[in-house]
Amino acid sequence: MIKAIFYSKNEEYFGFKVSGHAAYAPEGKDIVCSAVSALTINTINSISSLCDDYYVKKIDEAGTIRFKVKYPVSRETALLIKSLRIGLCSIYEEYGNDYIRIFFKEV
């Protein structure tokens, strides 16, 4: 199962962590994993290309992605992270608890 955690401060998103595998289908054919990966990597690439925020990104050997922006977060970066949340929540609504879970953590 994929686990996504969104981090916020004062109701403003500043980071996320995505880990695990959906196990929806065999490796290479898992559309849930592919969709989550595409949305997550696109969000990071968009923030890197379009925004001036300083961030820390870590991807480990297991594929866990940790991404955090140094506070304060620009409106553009916050919007892109919200867009990721919308995309992952849509995947959750379509495929459910067996493949992806989404958590929100106020820090």
Image (cartoon, rainbow, N blue to C red):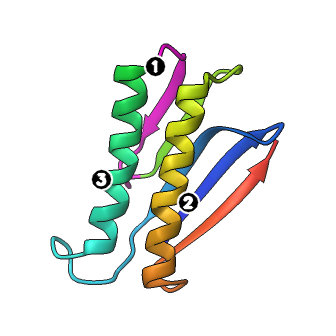
Could you say which is closer to the camera, residue 26 or residue 13? 13
Where residue 82 sits in the image (x, y, percent)?
A: 57, 46
Residue at image position (43%, 72%) is 91
Mark found first going from the N terminus, 3 or 1: 3
> Residue at (39%, 70%) from the top-left corner?
21
Can see residue 1?
A: no
Q: Which mark is residue 38?
A: 3
Q: Which mark is residue 4?
A: 2
Highlighted range, magenta: 51-63
Frontmost of labels 3 and 1 is 1
Q: Dot 2: within a 10 Å radius of its alpha carbon, few (fewer than 14), some, or many (20 or more) residues?
A: many
Q: At numbered mark 3, what does the secondary structure look like: helix, strand or loop?
A: helix
Residue 34, above or below 50: below
Q: Secondary structure at mark 1?
A: loop
- The residue type indicated by label 1 comes to Cys
**Looking at the picture, how far across and down is residue 100, in whole percent?**
50, 74
